[in-house]
Amino acid sequence: MPVTEVSHGASRADAVQLVVRNARIHTGDVQRPSASAVAIANGRIVRVGGDEEVAPLIVEGTRVIDALGRRIVPGLNDSHRHVIRDGRERVLRSRSSPGSDDQTVKIRAT
């Protein structure tokens, strides 16, 4: 994926750090379900639209990624565990594995 640093335009304190363009972006907005560019500043999406709508936000130092027409879908990064279920499964596995109390009793009885 081509990535460039843009060296035109005036730098600003609120400058956009990243622009992805030439993409197929799923917006999740019923009124405008797709777009071709997204601009990100300070870790937040500041504009979604066509390449021509986002282009004016590109300043010196903006990282620009040409998505080459690839699909972009918002992500949900969820990191969690199901502790109760994991514990129950661990107990059930330990009961049926060799060396557990049940197995020891059966071996001694024979």
Image: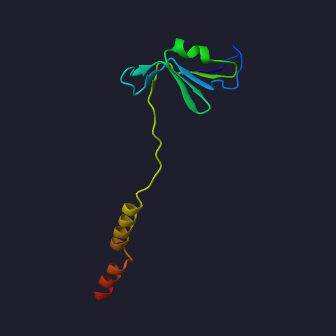
Rendered residue at 45%/52% (across/down):
80
Q: Is residue 52 above or below residue 85?
A: above
Quadrant for residue 30, please give it: top left
Rendered residue at 63%/24% (across/down):
16
Seen in the image, is 106 located left or right of residue 33? left
Residue placed most toward the observer, 41 or 71:
41
Quadrant for residue 60, please give it: top right
Q: Is residue 95 above or below residue 57?
A: below
Q: Quadrant of the N terminus?
A: top right
Rendered residue at 65%/22% (across/down):
62
- Residue that protrudes farthest toward the left in the picture: 110
Q: Quadrant of the C terminus?
A: bottom left
Seen in the image, is 109 located left or right of residue 11? left
- Residue that protrudes farthest toward the top in the picture: 52
Residue 64 percent location from the top left of the image: 60, 21
Seen in the image, is 44 located left or right of residue 69? right
Residue 32 percent location from the top left of the image: 40, 20
Seen in the image, is 22 located left or right of residue 18? left
Quadrant for residue 43, please give it: top right
Q: How is the image coloured?
A: rainbow
Residue placed most toward the observer, 104 or 11:
11
Q: Is residue 10 above or below residue 79?
A: above
- Residue that protrudes farthest toward the bottom in the picture: 109
Residue 19 percent location from the top left of the image: 58, 22
Rendered residue at 36%/71% (across/down):
97
Residue 13 percent location from the top left of the image: 70, 26
